[in-house]
Image (cartoon, rainbow, N blue to C red):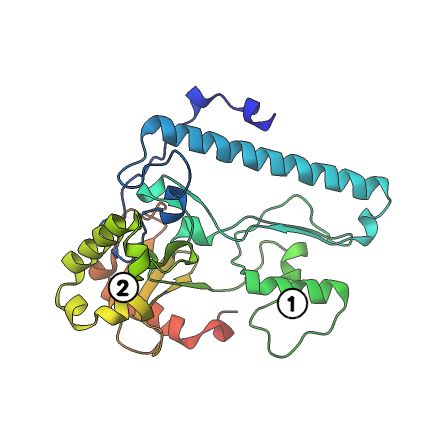
């Protein structure tokens, strides 16, 4: 069994279990999805032994999937189809295992937005290499179209990364984009703000989240509570050095931000501190780049 590959006693806990200093209280949730599961505390911290068990299960799951991929590749090879098959393996989101005090998915930070991506084609010239180039999941469709010789529709929002398959170190995209609404109150695609949801065990969690936002946002919450509950969007842009997260009313993406977050990966690779207030010119420059949109990223 894949679980037997790991000794639970040797599994380490998350090195960073606290939210980013000065980060947006809207940026993280209370692990709503995990708390619906059997044996998980409905509020409060996840204990160390439970955390090790959960991480153990995650590692086992990854190893199991890896084994299935190996079986699939063996089957393609045995069928003589490898030289006529394009293979792309990717994830749909990252996963928190206690990092930043969160379990699950769905944030605008690196752990959640960065996913695995492996590509193989019969004709690629460079095999087994990695690249630091920024690519996005919207790039997948144009890439597969180009590899398969299929015309690209004009409406696509993405760039084929076929050139990287032969030259992984070449100059490439300047930024990657993502967005997610108010994570604190919208995790797991539920609507915890409904009265019915507030009457479940989610109620205390929702109140805890709201109090955090109120302490940080103060008058802004009182003036625009409906914005926080229904229309607040986190827009994120990742460059080779920075991540900028801008919290805005999604009905007016050009509106003045409610809150900004900036991470510098050269000095803080784990996003432990929001330095937007210390570097207003960097924020302004990145904001202009974000507002220009994906079309100007390449």
Q: Residues within 10 Å of mark 2 (few under 14, many from 20)?
A: many
Quarter holding residue 36: top left
Q: Residues within 10 Å of mark 1 (few under 14, many from 20)?
A: many
**Answer yes or no: do the residues labelled 2 and 1 have beta carbons within 8 Å?**
no
Q: Of the two numbered discs 2 and 1 on the same chain, state the one appearing first in sequence.
A: 1
Query: Image check: 126 left or right of 58?
Result: right
Mark 2 element type: strand
Q: Position of residue 9 (x, y in %)?
A: 42, 20
Determine which residue is flagged by label 1.
Answer: 142
Of the numbered discs in the image, which one, if any, rests on residue 8?
Answer: none
Residue depicted at 28% across the width and 53% down the height: 199
Residue depicted at 26% across the width and 51% down the height: 203
Q: Position of residue 244 (x, y in %)?
A: 34, 62
The N terminus sits in image quarter = top right
Could you say which is closer to the camera, residue 219 or residue 172?
219
Q: Position of residue 52 (x, y in %)?
A: 40, 28
Q: Taking the image as drawn, is residue 161 in sight?
A: yes
Determine which residue is flagged by label 2.
Answer: 260
Query: Image check: 4 left or right of 25?
Result: right
Could you say which is closer to the camera, residue 138 or residue 38?
38
Query: Image check: 280 left or right of 51?
Result: left
Could you say which is closer to the camera, residue 6 or residue 110?
6
């Amino acid at each position: 069994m894949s679980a037997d590959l790991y000794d639970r006693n040797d599994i380490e806990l998350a090195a960073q279990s606290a939210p980013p200093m000065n980060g947006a209280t809207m940026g993280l949730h209370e692990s709503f999805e995990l708390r619906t599961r059997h044996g998980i505390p409905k509020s409060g911290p996840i204990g160390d032994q439970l955390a090790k068990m959960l991480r153990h299960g995650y590692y086992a799951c990854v190893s199991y999937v890896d084994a299935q991929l190996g079986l699939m590749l063996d089957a393609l090879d045995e069928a003589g189809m490898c030289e006529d098959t394009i293979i792309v393996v990717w994830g749909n989101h990252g996963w928190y295992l206690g990092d930043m005090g969160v379990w699950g998915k769905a944030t605008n930070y690196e752990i959640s937005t960065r996913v695995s991506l492996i590509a193989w084609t019969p004709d690629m010239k460079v095999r087994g290499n990695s690249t630091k180039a920024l690519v996005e999941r919207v790039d997948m469709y144009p890439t597969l179209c180009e590899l398969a010789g299929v015309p690209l529709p004009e409406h696509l929002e993405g760039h084929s990364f076929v050139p990287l398959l032969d030259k992984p170190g070449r100059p490439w995209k300047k930024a990657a984009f993502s967005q997610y609404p108010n994570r604190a109150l919208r995790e797991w695609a539920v609507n915890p703000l409904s009265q019915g949801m507030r009457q479940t065990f989610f109620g205390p969690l929702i109140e805890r989240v709201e109090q955090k936002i109120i302490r940080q946002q103060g008058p802004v919450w009182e003036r625009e509570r409906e914005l926080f509950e229904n229309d607040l969007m986190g827009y994120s842009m990742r460059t080779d050095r920075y991540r900028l997260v801008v919290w805005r009313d999604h009905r007016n993406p050009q509106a003045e931000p409610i809150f900004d977050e900036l991470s510098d990966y050269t000095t803080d690779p784990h996003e432990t501190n929001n330095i937007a207030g210390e570097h207003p010119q960097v924020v302004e420059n990145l904001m202009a780049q974000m507002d220009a949109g994906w079309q100007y990223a390449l």
